[in-house]
């Protein structure tokens, strides 16, 4: 955090323990910013001024002032997270991934909690997503896609869930590649794993979440974080999707509908029943790993790939972390 706008943003949206003050939703935050002109302009402003000069309802004005009055408690909370290796970023921070703003606009998370090599968030990744109950053929596709990412020197981006996600992330580690995990479960809990901490220390793993670092997994969180995978990736491969149901289908169709990222879909052994339908909706069909590599290279700029390859060290297998 390096800016008054960041401080005000964190105060307005973060929850501290059992604090009874209800933090703002992202939509409420952006409406407030549009009305006021910027979150830092709220610092030191009293309720009466918010009501008389900015037209806030009395209840909202009282809530905003109460949230901003938590600076001391928030400082302790940020320090606690920092000691656990977790950083907090807002769109007003230099380290916040610009790709999220470019792709998602106001749908980008206002708070992003992250642990690991922050610079990985600035590289275009190779997204790999799919069903939890993936077939053996589908698992082989996920592993091969991860190896493509490692060979190109680009991070493998996925969600850490059982099935395709964990298979691809583990394969990327074993191939000596970099991994970005966008979690829908507790980041703090993940970091209790000695292997995860070691991988983060080695500089080739980044875990992040738009949700509270202590929040447990929920289906809603999994649905909500899917768009970040697409936004952080030059191209995202859907290995296997169901039809009209499930998080993989929901995330892919949302990305196609709203332009959150470039979607490829596997058309070969191991594909899911929804894959053909995704192609019909505009996903780019991929029937070989050569086609996937070409699609990634077409989506990423030559500068991105050249920089990634220049920074890419000789592959050294990491432990299988994501089972």
Image (cartoon, rainbow, N blue to C red):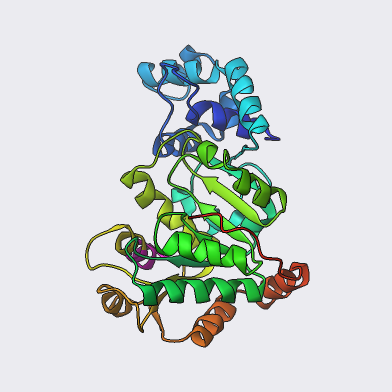
Q: In the drawing, does residue 180 fall left or right of residue 271? A: right
Asked if residue 202 can be seen in this view, the reply is: yes
The image quadrant of residue 115 is top right
Outermost residue to the left: 244
Q: Is residue 107 above or below residue 144?
A: above
Residue 283 quadrant: bottom left
Please determine whether, in this image, residue 237 is positioned above or below residue 25: below
Q: Quadrant of the N terminus?
A: top right
Q: Is residue 312 above or below residue 42?
A: below
Residue 258 located within the stretch drawn in magenta: yes
Q: Is residue 323 above or below residue 141?
A: above
Q: Is residue 36 left or right of residue 119?
A: left
Secondary structure mostly seen in magenta is helix
Q: Residue at x 60, y 48 (%)?
A: 196
Residue plotted at (48% across, 31% down): 13
Q: Residue 132 at x, y = what percent?
A: 34, 60
Residue 194, quarter of the rendered image? top right
Whether residue 125 is visible, yes or no, is no
Q: Nearer the viewer, residue 143 or 120?
A: 143
Residue occupying image coordinates x 37% and y 68%: 256
Residue 96 among those drawn in magenta: no
Between residues 217 and 236, which one lies in front from this camera angle?
217
Residue 120 pos. (x, y %): 65, 57
**Which residue is pictured at 50% across the width and 29% down the height?**
14
The magenta-colored residue range is: 252-259
Location of residue 138 in the rendering, given as x and y in whole percent from the top left corner: 38, 74
**In the picture provided, is 65 more to the left or to the right than 8?**
left
Q: How many marks?
A: 0
């Amino acid at each position: 955090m390096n800016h008054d706008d960041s401080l005000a943003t964190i105060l307005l949206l973060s929850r501290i323990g059992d604090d009874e003050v209800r933090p703002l939703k992202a939509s409420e935050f952006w409406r407030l910013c549009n009305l006021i002109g910027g979150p830092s302009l709220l610092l030191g402003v009293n309720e009466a001024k918010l009501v008389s000069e900015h037209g806030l309802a009395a209840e909202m004005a009282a809530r905003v002032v109460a949230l901003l009055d938590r600076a001391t408690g928030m400082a302790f909370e940020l320090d606690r997270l920092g000691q656990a290796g977790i950083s907090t970023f807002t769109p007003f921070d230099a380290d916040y991934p610009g790709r999220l703003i470019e792709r998602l606009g106001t749908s980008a998370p206002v708070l992003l909690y992250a642990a690991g090599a922050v610079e990985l968030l600035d590289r275009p990744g190779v997204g790999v997503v799919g069903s939890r109950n993936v077939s053996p053929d589908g698992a082989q596709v996920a592993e091969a896609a991860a190896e493509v990412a490692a060979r190109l020197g680009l991070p493998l981006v996925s969600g850490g869930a059982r099935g395709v996600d964990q298979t691809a992330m583990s394969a990327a580690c074993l191939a000596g590649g970099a991994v970005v995990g966008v979690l829908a479960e507790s980041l703090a809990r993940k970091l209790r794993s000695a292997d995860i901490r070691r991988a983060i220390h080695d500089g080739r793993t980044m875990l992040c979440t738009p949700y509270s670092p202590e929040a447990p997994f929920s289906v809603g969180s999994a649905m909500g974080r899917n768009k970040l995978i697409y936004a952080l990736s030059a191209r995202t491969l859907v290995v296997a999707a169901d039809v009209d149901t499930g998080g993989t289908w929901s995330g892919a169709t949302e990305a196609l509908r709203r332009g959150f990222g470039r979607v490829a879909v596997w058309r070969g052994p191991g594909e899911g029943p929804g894959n053909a339908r995704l192609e019909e909706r505009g996903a780019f069909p991929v029937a070989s790993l050569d086609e996937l590599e070409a699609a990634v290279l077409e989506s990423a700029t030559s500068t991105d790939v050249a920089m990634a390859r220049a920074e890419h060290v000789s592959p050294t297998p990491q432990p299988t972390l994501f089972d």
